[in-house]
Amino acid sequence: MGGTLPGMKKPTTPRRSKVKKLDSWPALMAEVCRFRDERDWSQFHTPKNLAAAIAVEAAELQEQFLWKTDKEIERNLKGGPKREAVVEEIADVLMFAILLADRLDIDVVKAIADKLAANELKYPVALARGNARKYTELGLQ
């Protein structure tokens, strides 16, 4: 049995990718949306479905590290197919996050800048440097 599902055409020689050189955030967002729009997938990209897709892809990313020691992970991330699997899962998470932001009309650059500014207040360097305590445990009251 071939590598196709019933009703699907047999894959042909891969066509040259339409993906352009992505050298800016707006170009990246536009390219992800172009990919979606060419396939008419926007109809499926509800906030609920996109949030679920992010969670699923994040779980697939986490699976790459499951039951491995830090040394095994470090070795796996140096190169080869295990590193490539991590790269692909990170890309999946980020693409779905971009699509959710687009669907919700969120300016991602502004959202991240605002979040960093809020975190600067929650985690002052003098109190947070070198420890992993949550901001509520830093004594900022």
Image (spheres, rainbow, N blue to C red):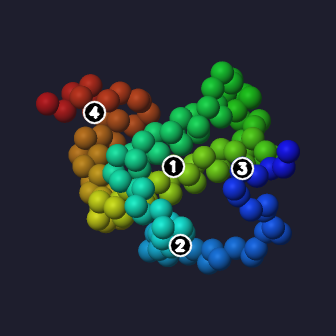
Would residue 113 be visible to someone looking at this image? Answer: no
Task: Name the secondary structure under disc 1.
Answer: helix
Question: For the point 53% across and 35% down, which residue is it?
Answer: 59
Question: For the point 44% across and 33% down, which residue is it?
Answer: 130
Task: Name the secondary structure under disc 4.
Answer: helix
Evaluate if marks 3 and 4 touch, with contact meaning CB atoms under 8 Å apart. Answer: no
Label 3 to label 2: alpha-carbon separation: 22 Å
Q: Position of residue 116 (x, y in %)?
A: 32, 53
**Along the line of sight, the residue nearer the viewer: 117 or 63:** 63
Q: Position of residue 11 (x, y in %)?
A: 78, 62
Mark 3 burial class by Cα count in 10 Å: few <14, some 14-19, many 20+: few
**Along the line of sight, the residue nearer the viewer: 15 or 69:** 15
Label 2 to label 1: alpha-carbon separation: 20 Å
Q: Which mark is residue 135?
A: 4
Q: Residue furthest left?
A: 141
Q: Which mark is residue 93?
A: 1
Work out which quarter of the rendered image holds the C terminus and state it. Answer: top left
